[in-house]
Image (cartoon, grey):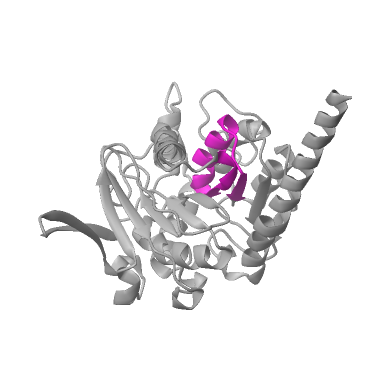
Amino acid sequence: MSIIATVRNETATVENHPSSPKNTQNLQQSSNVNDNTSQNNNQQSQKMNGLSLSELCCLFCCPPCPARIAAKLAFLPPEPTYSIISWIEDGNQKLSLKFSERADWQYTQRELERFEVHYAQSSLYAKATPNPKYTILFSHGNAVDLGQMSSFYLGLGSRINCNIFSYDYSGFGASSGKPSEKNLYADINAAWLTLRAKYGISPDKIILYGQSIGTVPTVDLASRNDVGAVILHSPLMSGMRVAFPNTRRTWFFDAFPNIDKVPKINAPVLVIHGTEDDVIDFSHGLAIYERCPRTVEPLWVEGAGHNDIELYCQYLDRLKKFISVDLLSTATNTASTTTTTTTTLAS
């Protein structure tokens, strides 16, 4: 399993070597459900759903600016939960991760030694594990960084037998720059180009996974490229529709217009959403599901909110089925269609 931290202007690459699942942390230790992250996400909920009149006036200036909307509503980068340590060994520069207490991960020294860190200019490095089913390009939520997500990636990748390839958005973790909608797209494009060009991973072996705000770069990339599959975890229709639930159209100043891009996704799409989500309403997941041309059976987690879906047993079960059954069936049907078409043309 590979964990890659994309850094704007400079890229920190974190590689994780595979080991048996018994050595991984439980998925319950995902940064999306720990106390620190829950507090950050509660702030997000208050921002999105409790705007005062004065805040609305400040938010929607004349003319309205999508970048301003995005910055005020969407990005809550935490104080960095990791740092990169450098030293010289045998004449070569060595790098390692140092997690702070804010990472909220009780890791062992053995687990820490499973990560390797590299720097690269405007690029990423990844080391694929032997015989993974797929490589997952994971775009995380808006209030965490890679330090908080590492334990979750470790457990998830081991359980579904996939590499995890992830990155920090501009302004998150060790990444320089400022978070913005434009930079979201640039960040995921850098990760995608590295997987394709530098590491030779074919598009049909890449699954794009976006969670919450991470569905924005995920949908954008999937709408412009052929990929193996897409997973949209607690997706939003658009920024305006989150802030103003009665919005029925995409205005020219709207940010994150997922709802207008998902019809262009040609890959199988799994939509996951909690029915009691109080940050991005369940209706967003339903609307995204209805607009995707190639959706598989969705996962609607009864009673789940925005930050606890991973705690429900059906979460892992559905991911395993999606990877082992749904995608296999899709590949078989595609191959059958190709064979039939070829035979017809030959006749």
Looking at the rendered image, the quarter that the C terminus falls into is top right
| Farthest residue, direction front | 346
Q: Is residue 184 left or right of residue 331?
A: left
Up-down: is 38 above or below 337? below
Query: In the picture, residue 290 is in which quadrant?
Result: top right
**Residue 275 in sight in this render:** no
Which residue is depicted at the point 52% across and 51% down?
Answer: 136
Name the spot of residue 37 as percent of width and height, x first: 41, 62
Asked whether 211 falls inside the magenta stretch, the response is: yes
Q: Nearer the viewer, residue 6 or 125?
A: 125
Name the spot of residue 16 as percent of width and height, x first: 38, 61
Name the spot of residue 309 as percent of width and height, x first: 59, 63
Which residue is depicted at the point 49% across and 43% down?
Answer: 201
Q: Nearer the viewer, residue 57 or 20?
A: 20
Q: Nearer the viewer, residue 317 or 53?
A: 317
Looking at the rendered image, the quarter that the N terminus falls into is bottom left
Span of residues in magenta = 203-232
| Farthest residue, direction right | 347
**Residue 10 in sight in this render:** yes
Asked whether 148 falls inside the magenta stretch, the response is: no
Q: Is residue 70 left or right of residue 161?
A: left
Up-down: is 15 above or below 264? below
Q: Nearer the viewer, residue 213 or 120?
A: 120
Q: Is residue 324 left or right of residue 93?
A: right
Q: Is residue 264 left or right of residue 21?
A: right
Q: Total number of numbered labels? A: 0
Name the spot of residue 145 as percent of width and height, x first: 37, 55
Up-down: is 37 above or below 92? below
Which residue is depicted at the point 33% across and 77% down?
Answer: 108
Which residue is depicted at the point 58% across and 26% down?
Answer: 251
